[in-house]
Image (spheres, rainbow, N blue to C red):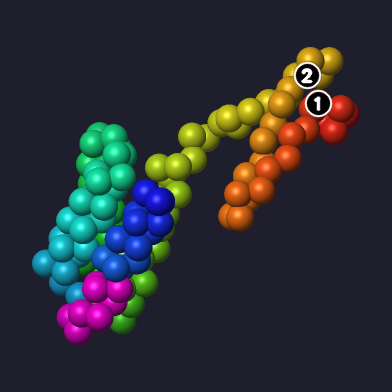
Amino acid sequence: MVLGELGGSLARALQKMSNSTIIDENVLNECLKEITRALLQADVQFKLVRDLQMNIKNIVNLDHLAPGHNKRNIIQQAIFKELCKMLDTGEPSFMPKKGKTSVVMFVGLQGLFSLLDDACFD
């Protein structure tokens, strides 16, 4: 349920920004406030949220963008990139060990799962 609410809040923040006629610093700050609020309500660590907000502001420097650039797309891409970076640890979270039994659970969108052992990885 939390992930659904988080996804909805993020989508609403981006939609509100997309509906704005002029994209300026105030619109960017409002969008980041809503994203920050949604992430904090979903119990994301404060430091991660603060870093995400700072990184997006560093990437999206509206003062230095050429007039022909699509500011909405640049902001959306920066937000997407930073959210992906937040979720990616950079290292594999699971590495099966040869000769040792491992149990892996795959969970899909419908809640289905299956259990496998390391015989599948040989």
- Residue depicted at x 20% and y 79%: 20
Q: Main secondary structure of the magenta part?
A: helix
- Residue depicted at x 79% and y 27%: 117
Q: Where does residue 113 sit, x and y in percent of width and height?
A: 68, 43
Q: Which residue is mark 2?
A: 101
Q: Which residue is mark 1?
A: 118
The magenta region covers 15-22
- Of residue 81 and residue 36, the one placed in the foreground of this image is 36
Residue sticking out furthest to the left: 26
What is the quadrant of the C terminus in the image?
top right
Labels 2 and 1: the sequence-earlier one: 2
> Does 104 sit left or right of 42 as displayed?
right
- Of residue 43 and residue 14, the one placed in the foreground of this image is 43
Q: Where does residue 22 sit, x and y in percent of width and height?
A: 18, 80
- Residue depicted at x 30% and y 73%: 15
Which quadrant holds residue 30? Answer: bottom left
Residue sticking out furthest to the top: 100
Mark 2 touching mark 1, by CB under 8 A? yes
Q: Is residue 111 above or below residue 79?
A: above
Callout 2, which amino acid? Thr
Check disc 1: other Cα within 10 Å, few if <14, some if 14-19, many if 20+: some
Residue sticking out furthest to the bottom: 21
Q: Where does residue 88 sit, x and y in percent of width and height?
A: 49, 40
Q: Where does residue 75 sit, x and y in percent of width and height?
A: 31, 65
